[in-house]
């Protein structure tokens, strides 16, 4: 079945550092790919998405490119802030009537 | 426009008791989903309603869990009797369409602790 693999955390960075959180997937067909974020004490929020190969999703300085050849959707940000500290979830959704399949989540801790 | 709302936000119950979680989806969203994250693991799908019908309940862990969506509006998820391993956060989500890249909107979750 479909699955998502994320790098294990926590990822600890200093403010203004470059962030990469790796995400790879296994799926049949052409899934849509998502990054969700959960800030401390809050619910899940959609951060960005891409629905077809080579699409780039972006939001709040974060970017991720749908790479079908490497089945990846890595999350990047050029300069992280303390307020970016959260748990980040990579997810996919297959074609048709499909549910979201999540990775295990990666906790990001950004220190001043 | 109101988002997906869940109640209660936090609940602490004893093993063997019953808890009922409620979810109000975004108005007009026919699709309603329940997910949960247990013990810091991945977020797992429980079930999917289209209006009042269960489209997919393949993620329901056992018969202690009962989900309903009478009238196709709000939904409830009942756990009876609760076990320790049921502790976690239960997310409800909704979307207007079920296909592909359509965004699924999540609530803030109901945090359940079974002691």
Image: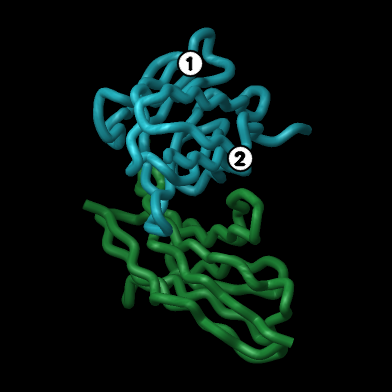
Chain colours: A green, B cyan
Badge 2 crowding class, 10 Å Cα cut-off, few under 14, some 14 to 19, many 20 or more, is: many
Direction right: furthest residue: B1
Residue A69: x and y in percent read 32, 75
Residue B99 lies left or right of residue A81; in this view the side is left
Residue at figure coordinates x 55%, y 34% from the top left: B94
On the same chain, marks 1 and 2? The answer is: yes
User: Which numbered marker is on residue A64?
Assistant: none
- Tell me if residue A32 comes above or below residue B9 in the rendering: below
- Tell me if residue A46 comes above or below residue B99 in the rendering: below
Which residue has dot 1 on it?
A: B69
Residue B65 lies left or right of residue B109; in this view the side is left
Which of the 4 quarters of the picture holds residue B81? top left
**Secondary structure state at the residue bearing disc 1:** loop
Residue at figure coordinates x 45%, y 64% from the top left: A105
* Residue sitting nearer the eye, A46 or B24: B24
Which residue has dot 2 on it?
A: B107
**Secondary structure state at the residue bearing disc 2:** loop
Judging from the image, mark 2 belongs to the subunit labelled B
Residue A16 lies left or right of residue B44; in this view the side is right
Residue B106: x and y in percent read 58, 42
């Amino acid at each position: 079945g479909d699955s998502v693999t994320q790098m294990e955390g926590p990822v600890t960075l200093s403010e203004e550092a470059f962030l990469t959180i790796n995400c790879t997937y296994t799926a049949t067909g052409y899934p849509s790919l998502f990054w969700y974020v959960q800030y401390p004490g809050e619910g899940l929020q959609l951060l960005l998405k891409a629905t077809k190969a080579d699409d780039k999703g972006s939001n709040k300085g974060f970017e991720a490119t749908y790479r079908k050849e490497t089945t990846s959707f890595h999350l990047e940000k050029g300069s992280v802030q303390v307020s970016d500290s959260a748990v980040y979830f990579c997810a996919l959704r297959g074609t048709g009537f499909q549910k979201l399949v999540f990775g295990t989540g990666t906790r990001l801790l950004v220190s001043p | 426009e109101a988002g997906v709302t869940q109640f209660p936000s936090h609940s602490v119950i004893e093993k063997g008791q019953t808890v009922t979680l409620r979810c109000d989806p975004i108005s007009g969203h026919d699709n309603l989903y329940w997910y949960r994250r247990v013990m810091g693991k991945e977020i797992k799908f429980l079930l999917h309603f289209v209006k009042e019908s269960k489209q997919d309940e393949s993620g329901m862990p056992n018969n202690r869990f009962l989900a309903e969506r009478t009238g196709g509006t709000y939904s409830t998820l009942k756990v009876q009797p609760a076990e320790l391993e049921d502790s976690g956060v239960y997310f409800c989500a909704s979307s207007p369409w079920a296909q592909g890249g359509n965004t699924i909107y999540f609530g803030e979750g109901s945090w359940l602790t079974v002691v």
